[in-house]
Image (cartoon, rainbow, N blue to C red):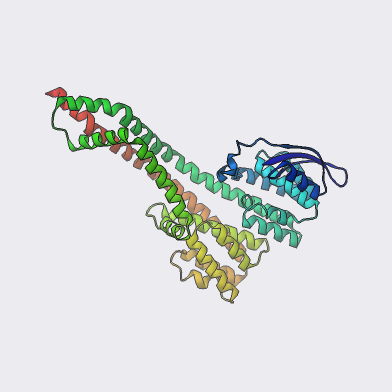
Amino acid sequence: MIYNYKAKGKGGAIQKGAVEASGLEQATEMLHRHGLTVLELEAEEASLGLDRFIPFLSRVPRKELVLFSRQFATLINSKVPILQALDILSEQISNRHLRAAIGDMISDVEGGKKLSESIEKYPNIFSNLYINLVRSGELSGSLDESLVFLADQEEKDYDLISKIRGALTYPIFIISAIFIVGGLMFVFVLPQMIGVLREANVELPVTTKILIFLTEAIRGYWWLFILAVAGTIVGWRVYIKSAGGRLIWDSLKIRLPIVGPLIKNIYMDRFARNLATLISGGIPIVKSLHTVADIVGNSVYKRIILEAAKDVETGKSITDVFEKQPLVPKIVTQMVRVGEQTGGLGEILGRLADFYDKEVNRTLGTLTTLLEPIIMLVIGFAVAIMVAGILLPIYNLASI
């Protein structure tokens, strides 16, 4: 549960924030442990506690994290002390989970902990990339630069995801509308028409017989259809969360005929940009590879990157692994080789990420253009089935 507090610090300064605890006593104890004297403490109303049972409800939207990262970077870059910057941000953040995390970070930093140690307690909010770059910035004394790197990275990731969602919104809306209209037809319209056709006592086309069978099945066993769909969704989610299922699904995604190249480009963009960010932030190459393997988002590429990290530990180069992998594009292998030979791997990877940004945008534009006629064909096919199965028999009856 989230508790909003107002407390007095060691220097007498009044602090406001939020803390996450299982009860009022634990929240009070946590604040006392950080040297705070509690003045006000009350539970924040949650959405009926559902976020405890549904993890999705407790996630911090990427847009909120982008705004937090950019504002935090701006404040630190302006020489505002960390505690003051966090205190300013805690009053501006609307997401209660992120606000609670910031309140805990304020308490930790005031108690002598490093910022990286505090954010490490929230892996569901801050990625490994985030934690490692903050830690590197603290060690090198360039936290402001690390936060700017992070803010730029978060914004680019957010822009990419927004473009993909924007490209998929139209086709998803149309397909959903087809299913909804089709369901309403099967439940309310077709039963009335089928009654007319049966009363005519004539031989019906195969298409009409199939529609009659589907209509009666849906009306009589609708609960079974719902259970089957729900069971399929749950079973699929459980399967892809297993190690073997995830590997098969991730392997299938990058081999799909049309969207496969786009998905592969997205992974290559993510790999190049994140690795460039980590290397530019001063993270050792082996640790950078391990971090990127965790955030690339595909178990197939994760294995390849981890194998490359092992080779680097033994004195080999990244390209020794990449050139043996058909799933790694040749341009990536060649650019990484150039970067390793010239000592400018971070810069080369940044250029490679820019290249894949353009490729992803171009492919998204092409797919969006192709989807429109495909959707029109699907709609036409659905209408043709309805006409052939229902309207033509009725027309024939009227002609007799």
**Direction bottom: furthest residue:** 315
- 115 vs 306, left or right, is right
Please name whichever residue, 61 or 192, is drawn nearer the observer in this view of the structure: 192
Quarter of the picture containing the N terminus is top right
Q: Residue at x 70, y 45 (%)?
A: 21
Q: Quadrant of residue 184?
A: top left
Q: Residue at x 56, y 72 (%)?
A: 310
- 387 vs 349, left or right, is left
* Horizontal and vertical percent position of residue 393: 18, 29
* Horizontal and vertical percent position of residue 61: 59, 43
- 268 vs 71, left or right, is left
**Direction right: furthest residue:** 11
Quarter of the picture containing the C terminus is top left
Q: Residue at x 75, y 50 (%)?
A: 76
**Number of numbered markers:** 0
Residue 13, can we see it?
A: yes
Residue 230 in the image: above or below residue 273: above
**Direction left: furthest residue:** 400
Residue 239 in the image: above or below residue 374: below
- 5 vs 196, left or right, is right
Residue 74, can we see it?
A: no
Please name whichever residue, 379 or 344, is drawn nearer the observer in this view of the structure: 379
Q: Residue at x 37, y 54 (%)?
A: 257
* Horizontal and vertical percent position of residue 71: 70, 45
Residue 6 in the image: above or below residue 194: below
